[in-house]
Amino acid sequence: MNTNIVEKPKKRKVKHVQENIIGYLFILPVFIGIAFFIVYPFFYSLVSTFKNWNGLVPLSVAPTVGFEMYRRVLSDSLFWQAFGNTLITLIGIPIGMILSIAIAMLLNRGLKFTGIFRVIFYIPVVSSITAIIILWRAMMNTQGPINDFLALFGVKAINFLGEPGWARFSLIMMLVWKGLGTSILLYLAGLQGISDTYKEAAKIDGANDWQIFWHVTFPLLGPTHFFIVVTGIIGGMQLYVEPELLLGGGPSRATTTLLIYLFERFGAHRISEASVVAWVLGVFVFIITAIQFYTNYRREKA
Amino acid sequence: MFKKKWMPLLLSIPLLLTGCKGKTSDSVTIFIYGQAHERSIYSKIIEKFTEETGIKVNAELVNTDGYAETLTASLGTKNAPDVFYSNPASIGRYAMNGVILDLKPYLEIEAEVEDGLDYKNFLDGVVDYYRYDVTTKKRGEGEAVWAIPKDVSSYPLGYNRNIINLSVELGHWATHTKKGAWASREGGMPLPWENDPRTDKQIVYTFEEFTNACRATKFIHNEIEYFGTALIDTWAMHSWIWAAGGNWLSDDGKTVTVNTPEFIAGFTEFIDLMDNRGISQTREQMGVKPHYDRWMAGEVAFFNVGVWDVAAFESVPKELLDYGLMPTPRKDNASPEWYTYIGTLGYAVSSRTRVAQEAVKLALYMSMSTESYNRMTKYQTIQLPNNKLMVDEYLSDETIKPENKGIFLDVIQKGHGKLHPTAMAYNSLWYDAFIAELSRVWKVTDDDPSGEMSPAQYAAYVQPIMQAQLNIALADEAAGV
């Protein structure tokens, strides 16, 4: 009798452990994937920043140089130029947000053909980046359609892709245009989530349309603003394909972003310097995002 | 029950293992790039190699995109290909880090084999491009041969005979070139394919004479605008800078010398030629129709011609493009030397190879066999002959264009060629810094009088940036990294 009482939990426990092991084995490939493709490279790249590694020999053989690679990168004027160029492109985030809210509010009014407009605005998001670049290069040419249009108003041809200031402007405009579709959809979802009772209450209190937007709609879109700003900064700091394909990082390095700078180091077998850039970039994005989360948390708490 | 539970896991193991690719030990792996028509040629040469030697080859022929990154990622591993491309700029780092073999012992063995290919028959001096002394860190020196040339190309000027003849016919040539030494000569300056009466050799224009030739060929006729020249800065400016006595680095390779008076003189002359004399297609026009397209359309009188261009240029009807080769300009009558740059790519062999002798045999075959000459030079010209035993045949073969193709070889063999500046240091980021901001000296639009900076201002601005990058390259080279 006693024996039976002792044996039953044991059997259950064995079965429980066996089931756990099988369960863990099923998720093991995912863990292995994360370990190999995320955790291992994460620490590998961190270690490489303290070595002078060229990628041709095993990392363990590369000489340890302390913070020398950080000194190299942070004292390089080209790094800071690339950093500045990257920050400048972030101007596109507020521009894109303003345009997106405006268009989303129009689409949210239940106008005819709203569905068609949504599709039209989303086309750039799903289009091939190469096709987009070819299109923009043709449009921005000194003898392209944009300059032809400006010429109707007596404006002299603008070298959109050949003059550093205009090249930055062109890049930002292209990024805004390309990202508009996603932002509009997010804002549309946000707007549709705002109950009409808030607006009606504001109306009863005598608020005009602008006041309703500024004091009711805009604050209630807070989570959407937050999401767009956070993802915009993360994406913006990792900008590579668009400036590289549209302008090759030029003219005069005006659109050489941090990732283009990183890739140049990689191509020259200066892998440790490339890793330093990646870490500086990662830490910068982490800090900015943490500040945003904290600010958002404080705002929501208030 | 237990079996059922384990079955998915057991089935997933082969899936995981399929990601692991091994090399077959008895074949030579070659990893090279090229355009589609080049890859087709390489395949045929490799097939012939296997047929003749019985050595199996695992060829990975790819296009240029991503080649360098893929190679970099594999070189430090046991998956490195046996044979791959390397250029003179890379061999220093590869040699210092032990990722490539010194080919000399293997080349010597091949030279001794009956019917083997003797590396001493490469064009004179070209193997030196791939020498690097790991002790003294000197390029072109030492006994070791770290790669053998896949090709050696030069980049002289070309002329379009149609435009020049039209200029003569319309009287522009005489008007613009009856100056200086040619003031009293009937018809003005000798045409680019004519001999200089003073030397009895093909004429080499001075900077000034070349400008005059471009002025004479810049006109509108039958509503077609012809341009004297339309050169691509990053490919062409070297000739003007070297002819003026300038260079990118000091002789010891430790100082960037783009701010010397000689460099600035050549650089200024080139930028003036392109932007400020009204004889070149402008940068605005280039945006509409690139220089290359304009040359192919028969609208540019003088343009650089690379060996690799020959097949494309030959495909254009002669009525549009009847071209020949000519030397790049020299500075003045007191400076007889003209220069253009030599481009070269080599075959290196991985130090991890288990088939070193076979790999070297393949590299030699790809480079200097009769089969490679026939496929890459004779039937279709994508490169010059590497084997000096085939030079006479190349020069006398009238089916190989252009007619005066000997200039290509003169550049390499008669001291008119210099290796590209990127081959002068441990990496090329210092040189890239010069090119990256070159547009600062260009005209912004045709209406603007000049660029943001003069060539002299740009040289002063960019020299410290280049020097900082060069210093890093020198430090890495000293440390053997």
Image (cartoon, grey):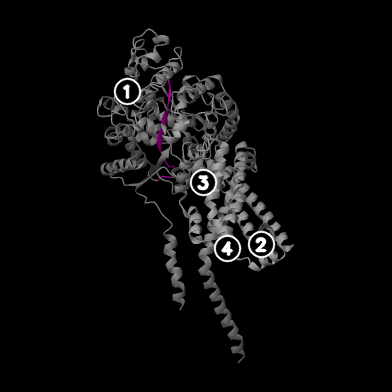
- Dividing the picture into quadrants, the one containing residue B118 is top left
Question: What amino acid type is highlighted by mark number 3?
Answer: Glu
Q: Earlier in the sequence, mark 3 or mark 4?
A: 4
Q: For the residue carrying disc 3, how many other residues have a C-alpha within 10 Å: few (<14), some (14-19), or many (20+)?
A: some
Q: Earlier in the sequence, mark 2 or mark 4?
A: 4
- Dividing the picture into quadrants, the one containing residue B412 is top left
Q: For the residue carrying disc 4, how many other residues have a C-alpha within 10 Å: few (<14), some (14-19), or many (20+)?
A: some
- Dividing the picture into quadrants, the one containing residue A198 is bottom right
Q: CA distance from mark 2 to mark 4?
A: 12 Å
Element type at mark 4? helix
Chain letter for mark 4:
A
Chain letter for mark 1:
B
Q: CA distance from mark 1 to mark 2?
A: 73 Å
Q: For the residue carrying disc 2, how many other residues have a C-alpha within 10 Å: few (<14), some (14-19), or many (20+)?
A: some
Question: What amino acid type is highlighted by mark number 2?
Answer: Leu
Q: Contact (CB < 8 A) between labels 3 and 1?
A: no
Q: Where does the image place residue A182, in percent across and percent down from the top left?
A: 54, 56
Instruction: Say which mark, if any, is on residue A180.
Output: none
Q: Contact (CB < 8 A) between labels 2 and 4?
A: no
Element type at mark 2? helix
Q: Which residue is mark 4?
A: A189
Q: Which residue is mark 3?
A: A242
Q: Which residue is mark 2?
A: A220
Q: Which residue is mark 1?
A: B161
Question: What amino acid type is highlighted by mark number 1?
Answer: Arg
Q: Quadrant of the C terminus of chain A?
A: bottom right
Q: Which residues are magenta?
A: B338-353
